[in-house]
Image (spheres, coloured by chain):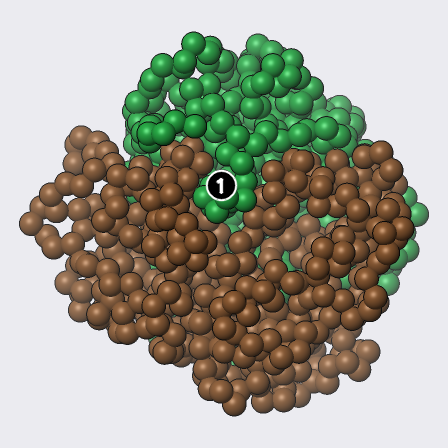
Chain colours: A green, B brown
Amino acid sequence: MASHIVLTSHPRGSGGKQVSAVNWGAASAAARGPLVAGLAEPARRNVIGTHSGSYAVYRALAVAAGNLQRDHRPDLTNTVPAAHIGPHPQWGEPGRIVSLDPWGHRVAQEFAAEIAAGMDIRPTIAVTTAHINMPELRDAIEAGRLVPDGDILEASGDVRVTKAAIDPVWYLPGVAERFGIAEHALRRALFEQTGGMFPELVTRPDLKVFLPPIGGMTLYFFGDVSLLGRPETRVACRVHDECNGSDVFGSDICTCRPYLAHGIEVCVEMAQQGGVGVVIYNRKEGRALGEVTKFLVYNARKRQRGGDRAETYFERTECVAGVQDMRFQELMPDVFHWLGITRIDRWASMSNMKHGALTAAGIQVVEQVAIPDALIPADARVEMDAKVAAGYFTPVAPPSVTELALAKGRGLHA
Amino acid sequence: MASHIVLTSHPRGSGGKQVSAVNWGAASAAARGPLVAGLAEPARRNVIGTHSGSYAVYRALAVAAGNLQRDHRPDLTNTVPAAHIGPHPQWGEPGRIVSLDPWGHRVAQEFAAEIAAGMDIRPTIAVTTAHINMPELRDAIEAGRLVPDGDILEASGDVRVTKAAIDPVWYLPGVAERFGIAEHALRRALFEQTGGMFPELVTRPDLKVFLPPIGGMTLYFFGDVSLLGRPETRVACRVHDECNGSDVFGSDICTCRPYLAHGIEVCVEMAQQGGVGVVIYNRKEGRALGEVTKFLVYNARKRQRGGDRAETYFERTECVAGVQDMRFQELMPDVFHWLGITRIDRWASMSNMKHGALTAAGIQVVEQVAIPDALIPADARVEMDAKVAAGYFTPVAPPSVTELALAKGRGLHA
């Protein structure tokens, strides 16, 4: 370890060691080259940021506290994916995937020689298996909507899944292109609007890959993952953006957990019919505004003159946050390209934004599956009406102007 | 907006505007002074980092994409807390609270004059109310363990809660002291081991407060929040560290969601008896290692020679991550000081690490409430045995060496 602090804002000598080139979008891992984001040898790094998203801060704290060796290298023995995913042709198509590393789960195999030679190359994706059990699935069995098959779904409600965790990896020129802006404008905003995070964003235009300190996503697969990417494979899917209050605690102000559970039901059915179900869980709490902003908006909605109602639903968010939504569905389709999916047969979402992003990315959505009305909590009517009025799909007639003006949400102390 | 990019690594003129002093730990908000972390006027900032934890990256993306005005100021009308929390004497006791801003929910009131004068001061804590409904609570009613009272708990399983979202705010000298290390060593590790995030950590020792881009916590209160801080108030509590796979999807490899649901049951009971229940949900996925590392470890556990067993449970984590755990319970007691809690009457956790941290912080734990054995999934036995062998509390005899060597976990393809 150097005894002096080296600022990262400008390039420096690599101490005789070669920095690996990154050819993003190349058709093979070898041609693309490894991403070197570890910190033991700073001179060999070829990306901005480091592993594990925001948990890098905890790792830094562990080093500071003397609990973790600063030159620790992960022992990747026995960690390779529990199921094969790819490679798919999309991995080598320019501009298709810009926000994750398609080779991220395969580094222990693809770069075995480099790792053996001492390079610190780590997975950004991990694939394992699990059994899950949600009370709602047991309810679905009891109600006769789901029938246990003893393989995918047990009578106990246990469901066999394959799952994947994905850390974000941004190819900055590709992200800029996706938003139709110049790369330097993107880099400057990322630097300035985070309070000066990573000066390399503006001082090192030669570094094109950024591992942002944000949450990633988790995929849950139902059925045989190896069938993905074949045109004949039928696919069911729900893309779910995190909502801790509903997903974990069952808050009744929104439809998040009910729609998630319903989406899993649709996925289990598809797997039982020989297709594959995929649930994509994105760590984008409160429309990527974070939970503090979300709770401030709840208070503003419930206290406003006239009560909590659909007609002012988005306005209240915009007053506090400056925007209605920060989830950027523009990057969302990348994971479908990673999975080789070109057609979604059953799509458990009525979001026009998600649908639009998929269509723009060339992914066909055959059938949209609405959440059954009986699963919508009464207090979530405000959200549902507001979304439908804003273009969210609905199988029934959208609410009238009079409807939208009705206070349907509870007050703060009801 | 300046047409040139200003690097943040060194101080600069404040353009004639005064930078507010921060007197951390002062007894009043006025004496402490506001934290200015907004980006519209960089010269007035008196902290490192900015608001909303890692969601700042999405906000930056929104500015880059042209969706958000870079000088947007939140309209805080009607957003003030839905319940009073504090001030408590602990807020002014040196070293008591170093990882959150005790005044973070009250900025709209405490700094009303400064905000009206144009300073960009934002809440780091928001307090609202909700109704939650978890299937496990309906099961508890059905089993007769919980009895609806029509107020805290409805016959439908609906529970009335107050809840608070808290973004992390670190006072760096205090955090360093908590870990027994020098402030400059902490700052240097935070800079270097994140891949160079925020050079101000090393170049601006005058800035003592850091808003790290990590997840915060959510508190769920059961009963009357205003009773907290009084010595006669009985308190029940569970401190829960996020586990998305179990908390949301019900993965059976651990006891996370079952223990969370059980903790909520204990909290509801306490509220029904006139006390207060508090669930503290920390965004520290996979022991703050992140989910990619967690899934790699699952694979290594299940594939190792001899199968998934308690005796090698922590070893497998350490091989991959370099440590067994990165949650740093040292900072966890801060939230109890914020709530004025000095005694926890019923503590729904058997973690020796959490217990030790509370005791070290002078918070008394009267009774530890174990998760009932019937709620532990079969596949979670490996985790439970390993924890008990490592010092985790248990109401029964700890497992023998022979027990620990038995493979009790499922294989990857079972």
Question: In the drawing, does residue A65 fall left or right of residue A5?
Answer: right
Quarter of the N terminus of chain A within the rendering: top left
Determine whether B277 is above or below B335 in the image: below
Name of the residue lying farthest toward the left: B16
Q: Residue at x 86, y 46 (%)?
A: B405
Judging depth in this view, the residue of B312 and B3 nearest the camera is B312
Residue A111, placed above or below residue B289: above
Identity of the residue drawn at 56% across and 76% down: B364
Quadrant in the rendering for residue A120: top right
The picture places residue B226, in percent across and down from the top left corner, at: 45, 83
Residue A390 rendering spot, x and y as whole percentages: 47, 52
Position in image of residue A362 (x %, y %): 58, 27
Q: Nearer the viewer, residue B318 or A309?
A: B318
Helix, strand, or loop for circle 1? helix
Observer-nearest of A118 and B127: A118
Q: Which residue is mark 1?
A: A63
Disc 1 marks which amino acid? Val
A43 left or right of A255? left
In this rendering, is residue B272 above or below A32? below
Q: Residues within 10 Å of mark 1 (few under 14, many from 20)?
A: many
Indicate left or right for A105 with B10 as reference: right
> Where, by quadrant of the figure, is residue A244 drawn?
bottom right
Question: Is residue A391 something one can see in this rendering?
Answer: no
Query: How far across and down, in percent of the image, does residue A291 sit?
Result: 47, 58
